[in-house]
């Protein structure tokens, strides 16, 4: 008997990635799909710790300060190691850079097989973990540029503008766990079904609404925001965009962005007196989110232009980030970018 599988019952993230590769890069060998499967596995390891965080001895700080000057949480370290381990097992991974490691990491003997650079924030919003608020993981994948020897120049392999990203995505460990990714062919979301341990397609081809009901900024820093950002926020709050807004701010960028992606609106982390370059990191926070936003029909700015066009000079370089729907972002371009 010949069985027809034309209407699959479920599509897992790993399957979806393979199908996309087959459709858009017929020459693909499967290494890229295998690499992404390493990422999804690592996030499942992290998710299982996050879910049981109050029961295992994994809450609280690890009494160690990272390169960012932040106290590392135990789960920051666990999530980082899960990713390094799962990606390290993929021959195609040449270089890794992470929030929790000062320098880029390379793997022994990968000079020939290693084609890819992976940068990530293993646990985003980690200060929220002890109080049961959503946290996330966010990543970006680049190709090792032609002619760069990663053994002597790993850093150079990492320092590429966001336009060079091959793929980007995140996982939110929220009321449910969801994986969202793009390879430049739309944005797709998968909800983790914990009973079978698989990310199952739940949000195909996500498009950001052209205007949303929320703006999202840490308004405790209001007095430190540049004048143009204050003017922009006043414009939004006073009905300048033709609708009444609510504010939402979780304090985990990935979760704040996820809401913005699905519901529309704008997420804003401006320069402040304390962080004149902004707080978020360009390579593994702003770039992946900017790539996803653009793929979903949104816009991402660093205050003076497109986030993805910035050529980085440092792995942990920070940037202001304003990302959201067309209507809110066009107003931002008028009020803030134009005066920058
Ligand atoms: P991380 O936990 O990975 O260090 O990132 C923290 C970031 C980000 O998730 C969030 O948007 C921002 O910090 C919140 O900062 P404030 O507390 O200054 O608003
Ligand atoms: Mn941190
Ligand atoms: Mn973060
Ligand atoms: Mn982090």
Image: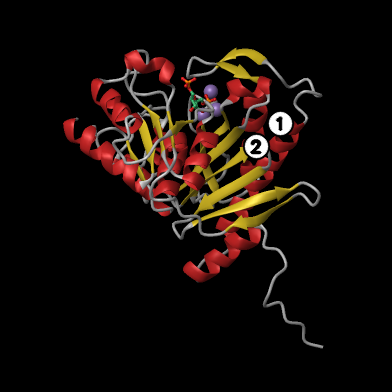
Q: Is mark 2 within 8 Å of ligand 4?
A: no
**Residue 240 spot, x, y in % from top left:** 28, 36
In the drawing, does residue 276 fall left or right of residue 69?
left
Image color mode? secondary structure
Taking 28 as reference, is 116 above or below it? above
> Between residues 325 and 151, which one lies in front from this camera angle?
325
Taking 121 as reference, is 179 above or below it? below
Residue drawn at (44%, 44%), measured in percent from left and top? 264
Give the secondary structure at mark 2.
Answer: strand
Residue located beneath label 2 in the image: 173
**Residue 58 spot, x, y in % from top left:** 74, 22
In the drawing, does residue 42 fall left or right of residue 297?
right
Residue located beneath label 1 in the image: 50
Q: CA distance from mark 1 to mark 2?
A: 7 Å
Residue drawn at (76%, 49%), measured in percent from left and top? 197
The reply to whether discs 1 and 2 touch (Cβ–Cβ < 8 Å) is: yes
Can you name the residue that lies furthest to the bottom here? 1
Image quadrant occupied by the C terminus: top left
**Residue 235 spot, x, y in % from top left:** 29, 31
Residue drawn at (60%, 39%), measured in percent from left and top? 172
> Between residues 79 and 336, which one lies in front from this camera angle?
336
Taking 104 as reference, is 222 above or below it? above
Q: Earlier in the sequence, mark 1 or mark 2?
A: 1
Q: Is mark 1 within 8 Å of ligand 4?
A: no
**Image-quadrant location for residue 60:** top right
**Image-quadrant location for residue 269:** top left
**Residue 205 spot, x, y in % from top left:** 51, 59
């Amino acid at each position: 008997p010949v069985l027809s599988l034309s209407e699959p019952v479920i599509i897992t993230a790993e399957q979806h990635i393979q199908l996309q590769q087959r459709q858009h890069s017929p020459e693909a060998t499967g290494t890229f799909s295998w690499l992404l499967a390493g990422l999804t596995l690592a996030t499942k390891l992290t998710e299982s710790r996050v879910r049981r965080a109050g029961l295992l001895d994994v809450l609280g700080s690890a009494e160690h300060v990272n390169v960012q000057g932040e106290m590392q949480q135990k789960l920051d370290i666990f999530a980082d190691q899960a990713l390094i381990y799962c990606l390290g097992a993929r021959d195609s991974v040449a270089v890794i850079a992470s929030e929790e490691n000062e320098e880029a990491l390379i793997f022994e003997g990968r000079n020939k097989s290693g084609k890819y650079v992976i940068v990530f924030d293993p646990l985003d919003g980690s200060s929220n973990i002890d109080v049961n608020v959503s946290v996330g993981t966010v990543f970006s994948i680049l190709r090792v540029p032609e002619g760069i020897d990663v053994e002597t120049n790993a850093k150079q392999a990492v320092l590429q503008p966001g336009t060079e990203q091959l793929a980007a995505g995140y996982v939110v460990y929220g009321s449910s766990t969801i994986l969202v990714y793009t390879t430049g062919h739309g944005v797709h979301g998968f909800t983790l079904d914990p009973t079978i341990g698989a990310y199952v397609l739940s949000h195909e081809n996500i498009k950001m609404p052209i205007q949303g009901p929320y703006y999202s900024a840490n308004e405790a820093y209001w007095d430190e925001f540049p004048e143009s950002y204050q003017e922009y926020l006043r414009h939004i709050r006073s009905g300048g965009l033709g609708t009444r807004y609510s504010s939402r701010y979780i304090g985990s960028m990935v979760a704040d962005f996820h809401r913005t992606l699905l519901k529309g609106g704008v997420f804003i982390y401006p320069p402040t007196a304390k962080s004149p370059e902004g707080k978020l990191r360009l390579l593994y926070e702003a770039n992946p989110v900017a790539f996803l936003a653009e793929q979903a029909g949104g816009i991402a700015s660093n205050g003076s232009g497109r986030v993805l066009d910035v050529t980085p000079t440092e792995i942990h370089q920070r940037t202001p980030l304003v990302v959201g729907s067309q209507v809110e972002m066009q107003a931002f371009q008028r009020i803030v970018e134009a005066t920058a």
